Image: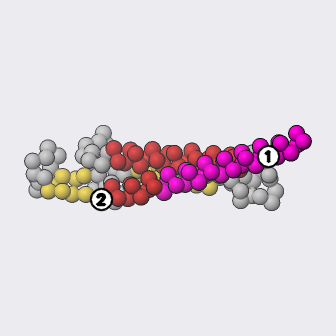
Amino acid sequence: MKIFESMEIAGSALTAHRLWMDTVSSNLANINTTRTLAGGPYKRKVPVFAEMLDKTVGGYEDIGGVRVFEVAEDQTPPRLAYQPEHPDANEDGYVAFPNVSLVREMTDMLVASRAYEANLAVADSAKTMWTGALEIIRG
């Protein structure tokens, strides 16, 4: 096992969860966006995580970090609301709003935040362990 492998793994998770928070932030910012460059309402973005395997050390092939495989669009249909006075209303008076749920985004934000804090604690513990080891070596 490499000396700073736990720090690298925790670092990859910190990067992934920061991107998840960025995605949640983007979704919340566009919760009422009815027009996009692609046409139609904003579509919720979801990060897809993938495991990073470290195959360089024998016996520890499953140890690795996490990476963001892609940021996919949620394909659930848009939320329709009856607002005939809205400029984007269709001929029946319905407006297609983004498929972003405030409750779901807040839940995702809490999960990403807690995972970020947990990985920060891992990095801090690893740093403390290595600092202690260095103190032992110094005598």
Residue 38 in magenta stretch: no
> Which residue is label 2 attached to?
77
Q: Secondary structure at mark 2?
A: loop
Query: At 61% across and 48% down in the image, what residue appears?
Result: 120
Whether residue 122 is visible to the viewer of this picture, yes or no, is yes
- Res 131 → quadrant: top right
Q: Residue 40 in the image: state x and y as whole percent.
A: 26, 47
- Res 134 → quadrant: top right
Image quadrant occupied by the C terminus? top right
Q: Please name whichever residue, 125 or 139, is drawn nearer the observer in this view of the structure.
A: 139
Query: At 32% across and 45% down in the image, what residue appears?
Result: 30
The number of discs equals 2
Relative vertical location of residue 110 with respect to residue 133 in this rendering, above or below: below
Q: Secondary structure at mark 1?
A: helix
What amino acid type should be assigned to the residue bearing mark 2? Pro
Disc 2 packing (10 Å; few <14; some 14–19; many ≥20): few
Whether residue 40 is visible to the viewer of this picture, yes or no, is no
Considering every residue shown, the one lying at the far right of the view is 139
Colour setting: secondary structure
Q: Residue 4 in the image: state x and y as whole percent.
A: 75, 45
Q: Residue 57 in the image: state x and y as whole percent.
A: 80, 53
Alpha-carbon span between mark 2 and mark 1: 54 Å
Report the magenta residues as a range. Answer: 111-139
Using residue 119 as the reference point, say whether residue 80 is left or right of it: left
Query: At 75% across and 58% down in the image, what residue appears?
Result: 61
Q: Nearer the viewer, mark 2 or mark 1?
A: 1
> Which residue is label 1 attached to?
132
